[in-house]
Amino acid sequence: MAKSFTNFPNLPMEIQLKIWKLAACNVAESDREIRVELHCHLRSTSHSCWTGTGQFCGHHGTCPTYLHGPRDGSWATFCLSDGYFTQPETYASISDPFAQRQMASLSLACRNSRAALHREFPTEIRIYEGKWRRGVQVLTLRCNPEKDTLVLIDVHMPNSRHVQPGIRPLTADAMSRAESDRIARTFPRDPEKFAACRSILSSFRTIAIQQDGHRGRTGSENIDLINIGMLVMLFMESITGLYVWPNPELWPEVWKSPCRIEDVKLWDYKDELGRGGFVEEVDYFLREYDQWVDVHHDHFAPSGEHWAPLPRKLSRVGCYVWSA
């Protein structure tokens, strides 16, 4: 039978603090994956200024030189006006249950253990139990954006255009404004909560996007990097590593003995997963993404109302594979 160490309170305070620090570090050293769904209100602005004059017009939301309709040399920039996280419906736990129990024990043990835990996990993420509505339950989870991996199981990103008075017909402006207002009502519209969501997205260094598609089910094995992934990455301003997270329901063999590859170009394609076009897909994503990063830096304008990002370029994309 295990015995309790009842003399712990009698130890010198310096020793107690070291023990609590080691206990917190032990949890922090585990490869924690925080699985969430992201809901964000995306807004787009079309610009012709940079390609037409070589100078940014300096306007966020409207570009005086843009003409309605398709034009060569026009670029769209994106910003967020609201956002929040929810618990994925397909997962029983947001993070590793064992690590969560360890963190709960440290949080409740005493003031010193809680302080040690907060030093190792300095950030708190708010996660709703479902889509936002008044009265929806919310839970909080402590994390370390420098060490933990944020896994985006799904991304819900309704897009509305900025209204550009005098550029488009009044009826089009009214429709855009009405659509934007309709979307906004599905979000908390709380500046402090959006600022917290923004802080989480912009501070995580390691991101994983869940991969859809399954051999035998579809004719394409493309990952969803080109569409949603491209837009989401623009707001990961601290990102240093992007990984493809296979959907466990569709790729169960990966999770029998998973390992993480830092670069898909190092993946041995002789295994049974057989992703022959994977590298080409990732190369295409990196080229397109780098271009969008340059566009957003060329058209950056700070805004207190919306979040206009300053994204970082990526040199590689990694993935999770079966190590056996």
Image (tube, helix red, strand yellow):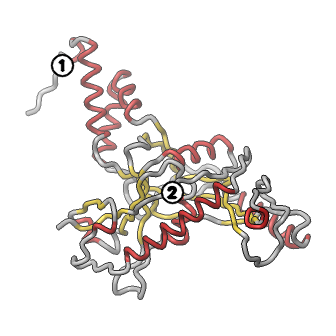
Front-most of 182 and 71? Answer: 71
Q: Which residue is mark 1?
A: 6
> Does 248 sit left or right of 43 as displayed?
left
**Could you tell me which residue is drawn at 40 percent across and 30 percent down?**
119
User: Looking at the image, which residue sits at the far left?
Assistant: 1
In the rendered image, the vertical position of residue 173 relative to residue 218, given as above or below: above
User: Which quadrant is home to the C terminus?
Assistant: bottom left
**Could you tell me which residue is drawn at 78 percent across and 57 percent down?**
61
> Does 128 sit left or right of 10 as displayed?
right
Dot 1 amino acid type: Thr
**Could you tell me which residue is drawn at 37 percent across and 44 percent down?**
147
Secondary structure beneath dot 1 equals: loop
> Does 289 sit left or right of 176 as displayed?
left
In the rendered image, the vertical position of residue 141 relative to residue 229, given as above or below: above
Dot 2 amino acid type: Lys
> Does 169 sit left or right of 223 as displayed?
right
Residue 18, quarter of picture: top left
Residue 317, quarter of picture: bottom left
Secondary structure beneath dot 2 equals: loop
Front-most of 219 and 265? Answer: 265
* Residue 199 percent location from the top left of the image: 56, 43
Q: Which residue is mark 2?
A: 313
Front-most of 271 and 110? Answer: 271
User: Which quadrant is home to the N terminus?
Assistant: top left
* Residue 190 percent location from the top left of the image: 68, 45
* Residue 28 percent location from the top left of the image: 32, 39
